[in-house]
Image: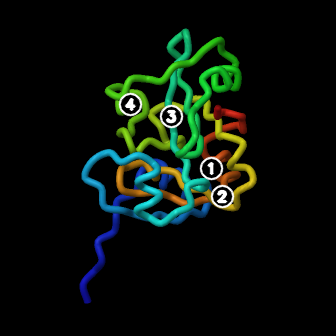
Amino acid sequence: MAKQKQEPKTNAMRILENLGIPYVTQTYECKEFEDGGQVADQLGLPHNEVFKTLVCHGPSQDHYAFVLPIDATLDLKKAAKSVGVKSVEMIHVKDIKNITGYVRGGTTSVGMKKNYPVRIDVSAKVLSQMYVSAGRIGCQMRLAPEDLLRAAGGEWADLTQ
């Protein structure tokens, strides 16, 4: 019997497993970056359960990760307040891999190069499950919001406009 090829695990998956956090992955065909809405539609997922991870930097060039619904817009003032700085701005797309260790479209708040402060939008608190990137393009993971919060070492925050 032929052995089925197993997808390699990402840093995020290994961390979840080491913490004993259950998750389920879903893969999809993707040759280049797709936004969260396209991913949700391709997988047939409700948009309110699919979240994106955006990385910003503050005035002192410290970095922060913000996890919010795919159809929402990050409110930079609320984001800055949530991490206790005067302001934040999005990092440049070309810097994503260098800062996080992940590529655009595959960034997740778990297992980045460094342990940046993570804030997860409060809208996730009411969900029994949520989907975030599993750490590479073409792979999403489903887990409980509280489990993502624990694995990312994050805090809840109101992040959207």
> Residue beneath label 3, please?
54
Quarter the N terminus occupies: bottom left
Image spot of residue 112 (x, y percent): 47, 37
> At numbered mark 1, what does the secondary structure look like: helix, strand or loop?
helix
For this view, does 100 lie left or right of residue 19?
left
Q: Write the residue at 36% across / 48% down.
A: 34
Task: Check if mark 1's residue and mark 3's residue have beta carbons within 8 Å.
Answer: no
Q: Say which amino acid is labelled 3.
A: Leu
Task: Check if mark 2's residue and mark 1's residue have beta carbons within 8 Å.
Answer: yes
What's the mark number on residue 144?
2
Nearer the N terminus, badge 4 or badge 1? 4
Q: Write the residue at 45% across / 34% down.
A: 113
Task: Check if mark 4's residue and mark 1's residue have beta carbons within 8 Å.
Answer: no
Image spot of residue 70 (x, y percent): 53, 46
Quarter the C terminus occupies: top right
| Circle nearer the viewer, 4 or 3 | 3
Asked where in the image residue 139 lies, by quadrant, the reply is bottom left
> Residue beneath label 4, please?
96
Image spot of residue 149 (x, y percent): 66, 45
Q: Distance from label 2 to label 1 (Cα)?
A: 7 Å
Please state which of residues 86 and 147 is positioned toward the viewer in this rendering.
86
> At numbered mark 3, what does the secondary structure look like: helix, strand or loop?
strand
Nearer the N terminus, badge 3 or badge 2? 3
What's the mark number on residue 148?
1
Q: Residues within 10 Å of mark 2 (few under 14, many from 20)?
A: some
